[in-house]
Image (cartoon, rainbow, N blue to C red):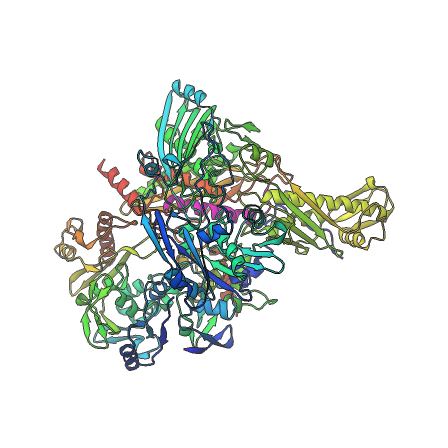
Amino acid sequence: MNVAATAPKFGQSVKRQEDGRFLRGKGKYVDDMILPGQLYAAFVRSPFAHAKISGIGTEGAATMPGVTRIVTGQELAATGLPPLPCGWAITSRDGVPMKVGIRHALAMDTVRYVGEPVALVIAETQNQARDAAEAVMVDYEDLAVLTDITDALGDGAADIHPDIAGNLAFDWELGDESATEEAFASAAHCVPLTLRNNRLVPNAIEPRAINACWDAADEQLTIYMTHQNPIGMRMFYAAVFGLAAEHKLRIVSPDVGGGFGSKAHNYPEEVVVAAAAKLVEGPVKWTADRNEAFLTDAHGRDHLTDVELALDEDGRFLALKVDTKANVGAYLSGSGSLVPTYMYATMLSGQYVIPAIHARVRAVYTNTCPVDAYRGAGRPEAAYVIERIVNVAAERLGIDQAEIRRRNFIRDFPYQTPLVYEYDSGDYEKSLDAALDLADYNGFATRKAASKAKGKLRGIGVSAYVEACGIGPSGKLARLGGGAGMWESAEVRVHPVGTVEVLTGAHSHGQGHATTFAQVVSDRFGVPIENVSVIQGDTDRIQAGTGTYGSRASVGMSATLRACDRIVEKGKQIVAHLMQVDYDTISFEDGIFSSTDSNVTIAFAEMAFAAHAASGFPTDEIEPGLVASSFFDPPEFTYPAGVYVCEVEIDPDTGVVNVASFCAADDFGNVANPMIVEGQVHGGVTQGIGQALWENALYDPDTGQLMSASFMDYGMPRAGGLPDYKLVFSGVPSPSNPLGMKGCGEAGAIGSPPAIINAVCDALDVTHVEMPASPEKIWRLCRERETA
Amino acid sequence: MGKISLEVNGEDVELDVADNTLLIHALRDHLRLTGAHMGCDTSQCGACTVHIEGQAIKSCAMLAVQAEGRSVTTIEGLADDGEPLHPMQQAFHDNHGLQCGFCTPGMVMIGIDIARRHNVPDAATVRHELEGNLCRCTGYQNIVAAIVEGAAKMEAQP
Amino acid sequence: MYDFTYHRPASLDEAKVLIDENEDAQPLSGGQTLMPVLRARLAMPGALVDLTRIDALRGVNMEGGRIVIGGATTHAEVAQNEQVREHCPALAALAGEIGDPQVRHRGTIGGSVANNDPAACYPSACLALDAEVRTDRRTVPAADFFTAMFETALEPGEIVTAISFAACHDAHYEKFPNPASRFALIAVFAARLGGATRLAVTGGGTGVFRWQEGEQAVDRGEDLAAAPLDEGRFTGDLHASTEYRIHLTRVMAQRALARIG
């Protein structure tokens, strides 16, 4: 029997339960799997950014050794495979629905970005598949290439999609334009800025992979794939592609080597491989190489924004105007319309009282890889806009960057912004004070002088971010254009010996759910954490779910807690019978059922055994067994927020920016596991530093070739050149879920880029520096500074 | 070459591989030791790191035939299932030095190599020595802490 | 990767026969450049002749005051070698900063020199330290060896057996790494050899070269910042413009010289 009394786990840095298999090299990732009769796939991809396909010759390739089948777009279309959908309906300012460029899983008559899949070769070995893919002859006729937002919107620009004039997917707005204009007309100060949010490649270290097999006898399709949301993929594959009815589809996402949003999408490659598995009636595996990942994993960011902030004499914000052009790439990816609209513009109020805001967003097609959610997804772009313009304003008005924020903070919660969202809770000033304290903000002048003595330029940057996490609620999302429920489900199964399985649609790909979800259960039932298994990722085992993205594990954890509550409730009913006391006298604490009317106590495991023995209570009143489930639809988003302070030291001779220190004070509400949450912040901040200093997906404007298409040319953050970050949590519990959590996965990537660029601008005494702040760019600014 | 003999994780093995088979493919596909991972095409991510004669190398930049007669150690060779973890593995667990786990085998193997060459390295040394290993999850801070601690534990062991 | 046959000769003579007998044979040393190239299907050698187990090609010897390093000696071995550290610490330091630890355990000096990547480290040391490249056929002074980027004086099938360097204590290698690849965006190997300054530049884009105007300026006691630097030696790319590379060359040279004192 388990000893019930265990110390509370929630809020403690419990070591991860899942570590063992990863540390022993026994993780199970999709590419690790070789199925009997395994076939391998390789894609024929477009080497051109924009071209007509005038012919595909497969004859030579088809007879090469080991080749099983070659599939083209025409052939797939003939099987009834429809184009890929974009899941979020956006309506333009003039009331016209967004214009969706048709995206076939395999290109039909036109290719629109380098790397777009054109044909699939299936062979007995990977090498044979690649050999044959090289031998497929595709005739292309060059078309005009547009990679830049401004060029694509320019007069006379060629249309990338037929019937979509001016390459404009939508021209959308949010907020009150006339109120904003009025406020600007009478403002003491109007501060403008134009800035670009650089395009990023997600680069999870595990590349995308799929292994699909068709069982013709049972008409069952089983797909193993790297994905953040396997249950969502089952719905997608079943409902949209008709490969098989949902009950005949099994999708398994085993261990997934990092996602960051890039594995939450519906990609053409996976659809093609799944369809091909049915055609060849065998298991077909495809694993992207890094080059394919660079060319085709949905990219992130890529905005060009004009922003203007209106302030009164005292530096109080009056109004904000934002005009953003978002590069969505060659096609609208699954969330390609959502990210630059409701994930972005809704956050432009930041942590501030701004009475009037208006945002306009134009989504623009270009001959580049489609853009979709990447860690933060819209919110980093918003934080960058607001946190940069606030610093520019502070400099213009001669107000300290911390002080201008303090002066404008929202202080009363809940707070309805002018942009849809009602912030649930927070204490922004507390985070600011904590961050300034951690960073020794007041001692900066001394450190700057010390740097100067060494010939270095030192700068300090503050940024205050807020984001919306924990998505749903489903109803609210549907009113904004969403097409699917955003609840999460959990099923809690208690075995006769008192061990517990949690089956949830939330999917961990590094976030440590096997530990944090178990912490919730361990506390609620008073059982040792080792006795709790968290099961995920297999649609044959999980009842339902919506996956992990948007820092929404709190939704699944809340569902788990509610299911646990139902178990306890049933346990009380059973125990009342076992003790022969009134139900109302029973209480449950620390794993022990007791009654005010009895000296007898019953441990959780004893109750579990009794529930299965089913002899101590009337089974016509209480069903035997001990299983409960919950579908939790949150009543509101959560709003994590925080303040980051970064110090940089610049070598003016080379332009190298060194991050000297990075301090973060985050309000994540209640924190389930500080160790894991710190790890999330470390990773997010590092990705943010990467964006600010090194990372850049750069297309050649003439050819549309991705120039930074390998780790040789794309500047990934490495261990060297980064400091140890200092973190503190200053949480105000969220009322939006029973655990009071807000979410922590994306914060670091949202708050850090503006903190770094603010510090760089401070060091150089310039108004703005575009990301990434590469050595040459900074060297040139240093040189201008010297000559000035 | 046809058949080659080598030692993998302390056991003599014979492999029948084509000459153009990379060591990582021989380990993963032929021996089914899938701990070493392939994360890039340009030998920069280090997820494929294993030891040859105790030295860390990238198994994606070496042919299997080049390992003939050599002793190869992979992540699976550090501790048998059910046995206690190697001190470096344990330090990664204790310091939350892993998240998704994909780069982890490479990180642990380079960590042991760093300890071999530097005995008790400081954090700055470890950061520098991780030049050839990419992690997208952890931001490296806890990996660095884990290697510093793991190296100290290895040094303290008899 | 495309198909090829692999050969592992035990002696240099055997290697020469294999290379002569196999059309499209290519010597394979550490493979740290060649393997990624083969994986990307950018080369189709018919045969690879592995030189790394030929004992005669490995190790370090002192010969008449010069350091002689076997072609198949790894970067890690050079970095750790007591004789290299004693007689030319800058060369050991350079070897210890090539690529990353894993690459240094496999990559070899012969492979690096024969490949002559315009961003590689070793070629700059070769030019600055008056190296001689020994092959199975002859000895080529470094000044005549590196002919253009990725091109050398090597004839088809010719094997680099060793490289000999002048011993030198007054030397330093200053590298500005490419933020992405960590190869040299610009690096300068500075040395004082026989009373004269040597400045060898790598990373410029067109191949390693000696900055003779800079050397002369230093030896005349003039300001290096004003010394002419041939723009034609440099190219621009997404990481750095020609202008920035030229500037970095001056900065790296000054820093390297400052370290020599």
C233 within the magenta span = no
Instruction: Using the image as rendered, state which of residue A246 and residue A396 is in the foreground.
Output: A246
- In the figure, C192 relative to C252: above or below? below
Residue drawn at the location 38% of the way across and 47% of the way down: A110
Instruction: Using the image as rendered, state which of residue C99 and residue A126 is in the foreground.
Output: A126
Extent of the magenta region: A670-694
Instruction: Using the image as rendered, state which of residue C223 and residue B80 is in the foreground.
Output: B80
Q: Quadrant of the N terminus of chain A?
A: bottom right
Q: Position of residue A668 (x, y in %)?
A: 55, 40
- Residue A254 visible in rendering: no
Q: Quadrant of the C terminus of chain A?
A: top left
Looking at the image, which residue sits at the far top?
A186
A678 within the magenta span = yes
Q: Position of residue B61 (x, y in %)?
A: 39, 66
- In the figure, A24 relative to A389: above or below? below
- Residue A332 visible in rendering: yes
Residue drawn at the location 42% of the way across and 76% of the way down: B68
Q: Position of residue A300 (x, y in %)?
A: 43, 44
Q: Position of residue A19 (x, y in %)?
A: 57, 58
- How would you classify the magenta stretch by its main secondary structure? helix
Looking at the image, which residue sits at the far right?
A580
Instruction: Using the image as rendered, state which of residue A179 and residue C5 is in the foreground.
Output: C5
